[in-house]
Amino acid sequence: MTVIPEDELEFRFFRAGGPGGQNVNKVSTSVQLRFDVVNSPSLSEPVKERLLKLAGSRATQAGEVLITAVRFRTQERNRADAVERLQALVDEASIRPVYRVPTRPTRASKERRLESKAKRSTIKSRRGRPRHDD
């Protein structure tokens, strides 16, 4: 698990939309977390590539990941939510994919496949009306 230092994260707070009464109009509870993946010294190059790929539309052209949190009514909880979501992305990107080593089918498995095909063919050819070859 790779831990991202707090100084590499940039937070921006703004007012959330939607229902919420006077609280929505007065308090900046929404959080936008910005993390510069490309220039981050705490991540290795393969992890950076996988993270940008995983981020999808949340990644910018400049190589930053943007996460917007508006789920909760308090700024602190939205901030914690954004950090947790970023950490989950980084954790997922830290897992190296297991590459499949391609193998060939064995001779016996090829023969079994061909036998089953032949058997199926005879079953299907026996269906229908009987032929009268006189």
Image: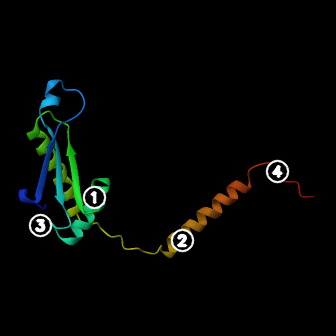
Disc 1 secondary structure class: loop
The quarter of the picture where residue 132 lies is: bottom right
Q: CA distance from mark 4 to mark 1?
A: 68 Å
> Contact, CB < 8 Å: mark 2 with mark 4?
no
Separation of marks 1 and 3 at Cα, in angstroms: 19 Å
Image location (x, y in percent) of residue 23: 13, 28
Circle 2 residues within 10 Å: few <14, some 14–19, many ≥20: few
**Amino acid marked by disc 2:** Lys
The CA distance from mark 3 to mark 4 is 76 Å
Q: Please identify, in this view, whether the residue under mark 2 or under mark 4 is nearer the observer.
A: 2
Image: 86 above or below 47: above
Q: Who's the residue at 11% across and 35% down the image?
A: 74
Q: Are marks 2 and 1 in contact (CB under 8 Å)?
A: no
Earlier sequence position, callout 2 versus callout 3: 3
Cα gap from disc 2 to disc 3, whole angstroms: 50 Å
Name the residue tied to disc 2. 110
Q: Earlier in the sequence, mark 2 or mark 4?
A: 2
Residue underneath mark 3: 42
Residue 130 circle label = 4
Residue at image mark 1: 60
Q: Earlier in the sequence, mark 1 or mark 3?
A: 3
The kind of secondary structure element at disc 4 is loop
Picture residue at 68% right of the left edge, 55% below the top: 123
What residue type is disc 1 on? Answer: Thr
The answer to which of marks 2 and 1 sits earlier in the sequence is 1
- Residue 111's spot in the image, x, y percent? 56, 71
